[in-house]
Amino acid sequence: MTAARKAVRMLEKKLHLFEEPGEINTEKCMEIAGDNLRFGYKYIVLATTKGTTALKFGQYFRGNAVKIVAVTHSTGFEKPSAQQVPEETREEIRSLGIELFTGTILTHSLEAALSKKHSGIYPTQIIASTYRTICQGVKVCAEIVMEACDAGLIPESEEVIAVAGTGWGADTVCVVKSQASKRFLDLRILEILAKPRA
């Protein structure tokens, strides 16, 4: 007598593959994130370089119960002491109910400085390069979720929608099980809902 076979449990979702990366896909990424809120996600974490993506998401999700956290590049990313998101844009983003976080990019700053000075390769750069084999946005999704956890803006071990892109705008949407950077190895990219194919 053979043991009864266990029924396969499966969740079906659609993967969207963009023909080209970049901000041209931002509106579609907003739609994909919005459509997936029906699965009960309470948080959207998104990357914003100049603040434009955060403003678009804030307007699109205005009146929705989801909490949006926008993560910017660190102060001094382009030049010493400079912010990439101007103060007036920051105020507008906050007026749309979005939490704004500016902090260190986890796979970039310290090791990039060491690599430049000493011509070496360091563990977080290897991690970043590995994520990039999927796409730039997946790397950024992992980073911004950890940054938001580190700042206490989202809880750990929560399934959240993360949105990022290549250069400007959004072209990647993932579902990520959040963790603080200290517990990076427990972070999980559970689903890739959209990404550039190129």
Image (tube, grey):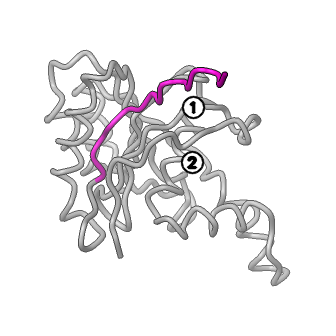
State the residue in front, 3 or 54. 3
Residue at image x 54%, y 67%?
A: 132
Q: Position of residue 16 (x, y in %)?
A: 26, 55
Quadrant of residue 155 in the image? Answer: top right
Q: Amino acid at mark 1?
A: Ser
- The answer to whether residue 10 is above or below residue 153 is below
Evaluate whether residue 181 shows in this view: yes
Residue 7 highlighted magenta (yes or no):
yes
**Left or right relative to 120: residue 84:** left
Q: Give the residue type at disc 2.
A: Glu
Q: Can you tell which of label 1 and label 2 is closer to the viewer?
A: 1
Q: Are marks 1 and 2 in contact (CB under 8 Å)?
A: no
**Is most of the magenta stretch helix, strand or loop?**
loop
Residue closer to the observer: 164 or 104: 164
Q: Which mark is residue 143?
A: 2
Please name the residue shown 76% across and 36% down the image: 182
Mark 1 = which residue? 178
Is residue 153 visible in this depiction of the protein? Answer: no
Res 89 quadrant in image = top left
Residue reaching furthest to the bottom = 119
Please give the range of residues in magenta.
Answer: 1-15
Residue 3 image point, x, y percent: 64, 22
Residue 117 vertical position relative to residue 100 in the rendered view, above or below: below
Relative horizontal placement of residue 126, taking residue 62 as reference (left or right):
right
Quadrant (top left/top right/bottom left/bottom right) for the N terminus: top right
Q: Nearer the viewer, residue 32 or 8?
A: 8
Taking the spot 48% from the left edge, 27% from the top edge, the residue there is: 159
Residue lying farthest top? 65
Residues packed near mark 2 inside 10 Å, few (<14), some (14 to 19) or many (20 plus): many
Tell me where residue 58 sits by quadrant: top left
